[in-house]
Image: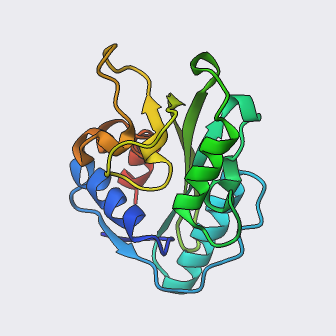
Amino acid sequence: MRVVLATHNPHKVTEFQQIVSSTRPDLEIVAYDGPEPVEDGVTFAENALLKARAASAHTGLPALADDSGICVDVLGGSPGVFSAYWAGQKKDAAANLELLLDQLHDIADPHRSAHFTSTIALVIPGGAEHVVEGIWPGRLAHAASGVGGFGYDPIFVPDGQPAGEERSVGELSAEEKQSQSHRARAFAELVPLLAAL
């Protein structure tokens, strides 16, 4: 079965296909090539639904859309829905990361807690709409490390790693990331809904 993923971000398409293949090998994630809607929602759920509705209407296929970001406790949950635009309108991942590190440069480790949030919307043409959420808790490092992943991955250190062996998401293998990421956690909530398609 084909499902369109409402993003123009090739990293997300690859990541979703890797996540999906482990639980639903019959599901093919199709890249979206249509117009990008204005993401003017103030929550992850609102933006995910905007994107999924647009992709489903454009393609006639069931559509998935992810709206995700990093939420830093000491910043009141920001960047949050503004994660992709934190340093301006260009969606410059390197500038976003550098600005966030600069804003937290004098914040001590006990206060650097953060989490990645992924909210996934599923829109079925002429049918139901569903929204699920996945949270990946951790903290922010003082400097970027690793070359894997994308976005804020090189500065996010997930919880649950052995003491002294902690790595950023940028240092994890693709398999390690896909098994525990916020998107994987959200997708696990979505599997029963996809099974009903």
Give the vertical position of 6 relative to 81 (above or below). Answer: below
State the quadrant of the N terminus. Answer: bottom left
Residue 73's spot in the image, x, y percent? 69, 29
Image label count: 0
Residue at x 43% of width, y 38% of height:
185
Which of 51/70 is in front?
Answer: 70
Give the vertical position of 141 relative to 37 (above or below). Answer: above
The structure's colour scheme is rainbow
Q: Using the rendered image of the protein, determine whether residue 45 is visible from the camera's viewpoint.
A: no
Q: Residue furthest top?
A: 163
Residue 68's spot in the image, x, y percent? 57, 51
State the quadrant of the C terminus. Answer: bottom left
Looking at the image, residue 154 sits to the left or right of residue 57; the answer is left
Residue at x 71% of width, y 66% of height:
88
Residue at x 70% of width, y 55% of height:
82
Residue 16's spot in the image, x, y percent? 36, 58
Q: Using the rendered image of the protein, determine whether residue 9 is visible from the camera's viewpoint.
A: yes
Which of 186/127 is in front?
Answer: 186
Give the vertical position of 135 relative to 1 (above or below). Answer: above
Residue at x 44% of width, y 43% of height:
144
Residue 75's spot in the image, x, y percent? 74, 35
Q: Quadrant of residue 91?
A: bottom right
Give the vertical position of 68 relative to 166 (above or below). Answer: below
Which of 81/166 is in front?
Answer: 166
Looking at the image, residue 172 sits to the left or right of residue 185; the answer is left
Which of 79/155 is in front?
Answer: 155
